[in-house]
Amino acid sequence: MLRLLRARHLTSIIPNRTLLLSKPFSTTPPPWTETVDYLDESGSVISTSPGARPAIPKQDSTFLAGSVPLPVSHPVAAARLASLALRHPWGPDLLSRLDSLPSPPSFSVLLTSISSLPSSDPTPSLSLFNWAKRQSWCEPSQSEPMFNLVLQRLKGSEHSEHVLKLFDEMLSLGEKDQELLAQFSPSLNLAVQLLASGSLLEPSFACFKKLKDHGFTHFTTQTFNSMITLFLTKGLPYKAFEIYESMETSQCSLDSETYELMVPALAKSGRLDSALKLFSDMKLREDNKNRPCFGIYQSLVDSLGKAGRLDAATGLYREMQNLGYKPTNATNASIIEALVKAGKLDAGMELWEEMKRVGFRPNFSLYTMIVEANAKSGKLDTAASLFNEMEKAGFFPTPATYACLIEMHSAAGQVDPAMRAYGSMLNAGVRPGLGTFTSLLTLLAKKKLIDLAAKILLEMKASGFPVEVNASDMLMVYIKEGSTELALKWLRFMDSAGIRTNNFIIRQLFESCMKTGMYESARPLLETYVGSAGKVDWILYTSILAHLVRCQAEANERAIMEILSITKHKAHEFLCDLFTGPEQRKKPVLTFVREFFQGIDYESEENAARYFVNVLLNYLVLMGQMNRARCVWKVAYESKLFPKAIVFDQHIAWSLDVRNLSVGAALVSVVHTLHRFRKRMLYYGVVPRRIKLVTGPTLKMVVAQVLESLESPFEVSKVVLRAPGDAVLEWFKKPIVQQFLLNEIPSKGDVLMHKLNVLFPSSAPEVRALSPPKPFSMGK
């Protein structure tokens, strides 16, 4: 009996497929197409009865269950329609069955059936919707809820075609009637929101723009928010700002979501003033009962800190803490980084200590930043302490952190901390970079720890870095500091390690050895320089000759002469031939000197040639070779190496300027020029009013002492020796002056040579004159 009653109850609530699938009713009831089997507890059939069917044709308000007429409830009718759509989701079969309904369903039944369909598959809902909107009883003014229901089942980008189709249908229905367009506003807004939430940029913006072009003013705040979110997600903040501006001009009010979107977006794009204004408006709104979210504070603090507006950033940071928000690692790192970059390291460290007091555990990036900041600001003790604390906290320092500490310790000249950091870096398995090696080598070079520097350089070479530049830089450090012995030791290490340096540094070290008198060490350096195609120019050769001029020991003289021969410079051949006789040269000395000076390229070597003449005349005077020295001066003056030395101002004044000459060149030029003045005055009868010898403060006493021994009429002033022309003419007539100017030794006790020995006591020119230098390289 219980099973029978259950069966009768089911027949009253289960939709009958015969009713929905039968053809339109005629005046007689349709044939029975389905039956109901009544079973007992064992499953045996008790009886069989006809299924449910309408009691009255063309009405679905009642139906017969067996022979009992029962009313059809609203939910049952909606369930029957939904079950039909689920059984036949789409196609002609569904349409034929819907068209064969005994009577059209009411609009509420249709909406209920659509809403009861599962949202995972929108096909049944679309099928019912498409069938309903073609029916004559479906008015457009009543279809908005049905559009809305269907759109709610079209979430996701895969249904964008259906959403666009529904949007176009609603827009076409509302084009001629603005009231109808306004009536469709919930569904139109929903369509735009669905497209935006599906990350469909172009379709959603196209629909949004179409609505604006049609004069649609019923946008909702959620629609604006969805468009702003889409543009921000796609990396188009300026388009989002345009949507926000149109939102401000519309009648939509800003909600909390709008503020949470726009304030961070404006701050990150650099529009800080606009972001702060919007943030203030948010806090002043009466209907906004919720406090600003954490993301707003975080973005403002970060952006203001990066922009250098530290007061505003710090104020918002404190306000965020007062509201109960706990700053994240990123926020703390941002505010501390801003303080450090602004040069307010002390304020950053105070905030650091405050964070640690409240139990905040700094993260890796924060530790790294604060260690490097203290190191770069010179607080190396604090940086080292924080570095140790970082290691104890379990954080593995980055190569940049190691490099920063090592470089800062090296810059401060602290060898032990730098080497400890370097050892810790190697023990941690971190490969030092080029900058780390360079800073360490520079430090060790300055501290003259050459053995330790050699160890570091070999490790650098083993790491695969090119070491030639760093090794050469260290060599230059020793050379510039005057540590020639260390430089030579470092160069020997480089040779043993197979590290080569350049000719420029070899030349610098050679010159350093020459200055310190280490001629035995200088010789192999010059041989290396010449052997590697290094150019021995006029300057280098003349500098070696200058060392010969200043040399005092005979052994050193021979060493320097050997060095001069190694240069293989043409000036050395000239110097050797200059001391030979005319029989060996096969030409007079003046002709020989002229031929040599004709081979000089004065356009590129004028200054170098002038330097060579000065040093050579020094050497010739010291060697007592006045005749050869006068020939060199005569040819140099003819070659316009000293164009402004001699000035003839008609009958007013004749002058000789020796301020830019060496001591020997000045003496030779004075003798030679006075000889020229004597010839003009005696042979041509031209006597100037006065004669001046412009010597400058340095050469004044040298020239004055030479002329004083000959009882000259020249008066000594600050920088000039001057005398009247007539007095000089009478002076020229004296035999001793004539012998002096003609390069003949006066007979009065060798006066001139005695004065030269007084001027150059260490050179012994008389001894040198007896044994002229022998050429080592030319074999003469």
Image (cartoon, rainbow, N blue to C red):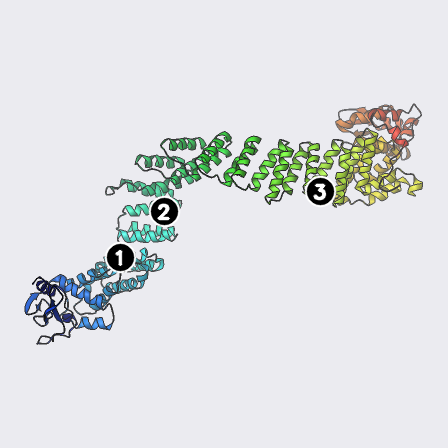
Q: Amino acid at mark 3?
A: Asn
Q: Which residue is mark 3?
A: 503
Q: Which residue is mark 2?
A: 265
Label 3 element class: helix
The answer to which of 303 and 462 lies nearer the viewer is 462
Mark closer to the chain start, 3 or 1: 1
Circle 3 Cα neighbour tier, 10 Å, few/some/many (<14 / 14–19 / ≥20): some
Could you tell me if the residues under marks 3 and 1 are in contact, i.e. CB atoms within 8 Å? no
The answer to which of 5 and 162 lies nearer the viewer is 5
- Furthest residue toward front: 42
Residue 11 in the image: x percent, y percent? Answer: 11, 66
The answer to which of 211 and 376 lies nearer the viewer is 376
Q: Amino acid at mark 2?
A: Ala
Q: Amino acid at mark 1?
A: Leu
- Label 1 vs label 2: CA separation? 24 Å
Q: Which residue is mark 1?
A: 190
Q: Nearer the viewer, mark 3 or mark 1?
A: 3
Mark closer to the chain start, 1 or 2: 1
Residue 644: quadrant of the picture: top right
Residue 280 in the image: x percent, y percent? Answer: 31, 40
Residue 404 in the image: x percent, y percent? Answer: 52, 37
Circle 2 Cα neighbour tier, 10 Å, few/some/many (<14 / 14–19 / ≥20): many
Whether residue 687 is visible: no
Q: Which mark is residue 126?
A: none
Label 2 element class: helix
Residue drawn 25% across the image and 55% down it = 218
